[in-house]
Structure formats: C-alpha cells, structure tokens
Amino acid sequence: MSTGTGSGKSTATWRNWAGNVTARPAREVTPASVDELAAALRRAKEDGLKAKPVGTGHSFTPTASTDGLLIRPDLLTGIRGIDRAAGTVTVEAGTPLKRLNAALAREGLSLTNMGDIMEQTVSGAISTGTHGTGRDSASIAAQIVGLELITADGTVLTCSADENPDVFAAARIGLGALGVITAITFAVEPIFFLTAREEPMTFDKVTDDFDALVTENEHFEFYWFPHTGSCNTKRNNRSPGPAAPPGKVSAFVEDELLSNGLFQVVNTLGRAVPAAIPGIAKISSKALSARTYTDIPYKVFTSPRRVRFMEMEYAVPREALVATLRELKSMVDRSRLRISFPVEVRTAPADDITLSTASGRETAYIAVHMYRGTPYQAYFTAAERIFTAHEGRPHWGKVHTRDAEYFAKKYPRFGEFTALRDRLDPDRLFGNDYLRRVLGA
C-alpha cells in the first residue's frame, strides 16, 4: 500500500462500514498536503485512472468506490483556523466529525446542528448530505460558508457565496463528482446547552400531533417500532444549563437496548428466528421510559452505533410525512415482513443547496433499517414504492434504486449540477458506476 504520492500498487480490498460495497483500487495514496494531493491526481490522470476520495465508508451506496486511485484523507486533518469575529472555523477535509466536535468544545464553540453519528469525515458527511433534525437549523452542509476544492485539472478553487458561487451552491453536497474537497469553513457559535426530553408516545398520537411537535421544538425526532403502535420521541431545546447528563441506568437502556450490545443480541436472535421479532419489538418498546437530560450539543445530538445495518432513507415534503408514514405502517402490518429495527423520522427546513434532499422545500425524513445479514430487499422495495409516490428524494449515501432520469424530475436545479460537472470534470476523472447511474453519463 502506498502513502504520500507514491505510485505503488494496492493489494487491499476496500469495504464500506456496512460491508455491502467492496472495491479493489489499483493504487492508494494518503497525501499529507494539498500539493501532494494535486500531484497524485495529475499522475492518476496521466495513467488513465479514475480517482475517488474515501472517508470512513459510512455510505451504503458506492459513492466512493473506485478501481483506480483511492485517496485516503487520513493526514489532511485538524483545524486550520478559527475566526471568532466572523464565527467560523476552517477544518481539513479528512477530520472526523467526532474530533471536530471535541476540538470545538475545547474552544468553547459548537456547530448549530448535527446528525446522530459522528464517525464520518467532515468531507464525506457533507458530500452525501448528512443531516440531523431541526425546525430552523438544517444539514451539516447548510452550515458551510466556504470550501476549498481541487478540480480535475489540478486547480484549487476557493468557493463561497461570493467567490465561485455556482460551485459553492453545488459542491456543498457534491457526491465527490466535482472534485476533491480539501478544506471546509463552517459557521459555528459559542457553545450552548441542550435539554433533551425523551418520551414514549403512541404512533397515533405522534402522527396526529406531528406538526405541533415540530413547531414547538427546535429539534424533534421519533422512532416507530414496527409491529407495534409504539414510538419513542425526542425533543431537544436550548437550555441555560448546567449539564445534567443521563443517569447510568437510563443511559444503559438507551445506548445498549436501542443502539448497541443488547440491541445486537436482539437482532441476532431475530435474524435466527424471524417469527420472534414482533414479540421482541413489543417487549423492547415497553422497556422505554421518559427521561430528561442536559449537555453540550454533540453529547445530545450524537450517540454511538456499534450494531451494523443496512439503511434506506427518503426525504418527502414535510406536509406529506404523516400520510407516507401511515402507508408504511399499513404495508408492514399487512405483510409477512419481520422488522427488528425502528423507523426513524426527522425534519429539516428548506435550503438552497443544488442537490440537497431539502433543496427548496420543507422536508421530513423517513429512514428504514435492517440488521446486517438479514434480507432487506423486500422491505426496502416496498418502502421505496411508497416514498417515491410521495415525491421522495433518497439520501445520496443510503440504499436506493433511483437514477438520473428520476432525479431530473425531483430536483428543479438538477441540470445546473450536471452542467457544472461537465465544466469541472469533462473527462470524468472523479466518475464511477454509481455517479453514472444517478447523474447520467
């Protein structure tokens, strides 16, 4: 395996986190600077190789898959600079979100909103549209105020609303199709406290009251347990503090029963004996109880995820969420499917990013999961049929079967993105089979 700008052959097979995507790159590099990265791209182009950067592999799609040059950003990490007057931080593209969150906290700063997993690199997270939930605050990419991008011809572009604004509009969620991001400037704010209130609620109540729950809370999300009429809701709102983390017992229930150790056992049992899943789901959903806790943002927004799974997530217009979810529940209730993972529902305000799933519309997200190693195709196919009937846009980094023809109808600015790609990467140095499917030739 080569490092720096070395051109040695790679013998390692690359796998994503879920294990459903593998690739055998011809070459790997781990550049230590923007100049080294540019040199590696020039060499790949001369040798007729495609090139793709890859982060931690948390995408379920082959967005980063390549048989050419695999670029690992492991050495392009850390904070380049903090501008407290402007309220921004510039960070190297390979920095894991968990390291960024901890570093910002040490500086008394925080992102406004974030997703619930922080293992990804910042560039990987934004490039596929990673998001949390928020009434007023949007995805991680929507918090970007500037980025640095190396294009196919080796040019280093600095992009913002004022400089290369057309590239900025698209590259914040660029799917790795426009170039290699080397640095990102985020808007940040002084660190604050969030109080989380978790509360079981029936499916009927949470869907009846959905609009009010979203309107009354800065961040609202819920999980529905298939085969039951039970949900677990979570409301995060700003608080004066002080920190009051979850107690050990409630933390154990949340982290282990819903997310990790015990959840792994439950899913392994369900995989072996699918008929047991509805009964397990009813017991699991009844194990939840209300709890309230307060902490700094990343400790409230994020949680560890050790159980591996497959996931599909679609964004639908917010006003279509309740009807879509009720159809999903009816489908599961009528079917012989056995679903051991909860369904996650979140929201986002409209944003102005060309291929954001929330571009131009108030959005709600529905994520369906299956334990890794269990057949997921029947469930995901049935769910996708419902999602697409409600103008759904699939998450770029999660399982879906849509193509460029579909996206051209669902994204009013799709043509802007593909035209920009034609200009920045006419020879498709950054192309692969997945991008050919979702963006066209």
Image (cartoon, grey):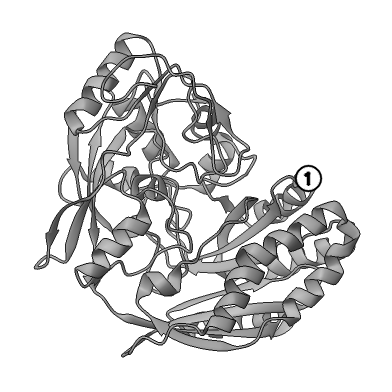
Q: Under tag 1, what secondary structure?
A: loop
In-image side of 239 versus 23 (left or right): left
In-image side of 52 versus 400 (left or right): left
Tell me if residue 195 comes above or below residue 179 in the rendering. below
Determine which residue is flagged by label 1: 375
Task: Determine the residue positioned at 26% across, 75% down.
Answer: 191
In-image side of 346 versus 2 (left or right): right
| Residue 248 screen position, x and y as percent | 53, 82
Q: Nearer the viewer, residue 155 or 30?
A: 30
**Which residue is most to the front?**
248
Q: Quadrant of the N terminus?
A: top left
| Residue 125 screen position, x and y as percent | 41, 50
Task: Determine the residue positioned at 38% across, 50% down.
Answer: 126
Amino acid type, label 1: Pro
**Which residue is most to the top?**
47
| Residue 33 screen position, x and y as percent | 19, 33
In-image side of 409 versus 127 (left or right): right
Tell me if residue 375 comes above or below residue 287 in the rendering. above
| Residue 407 screen position, x and y as percent | 54, 42
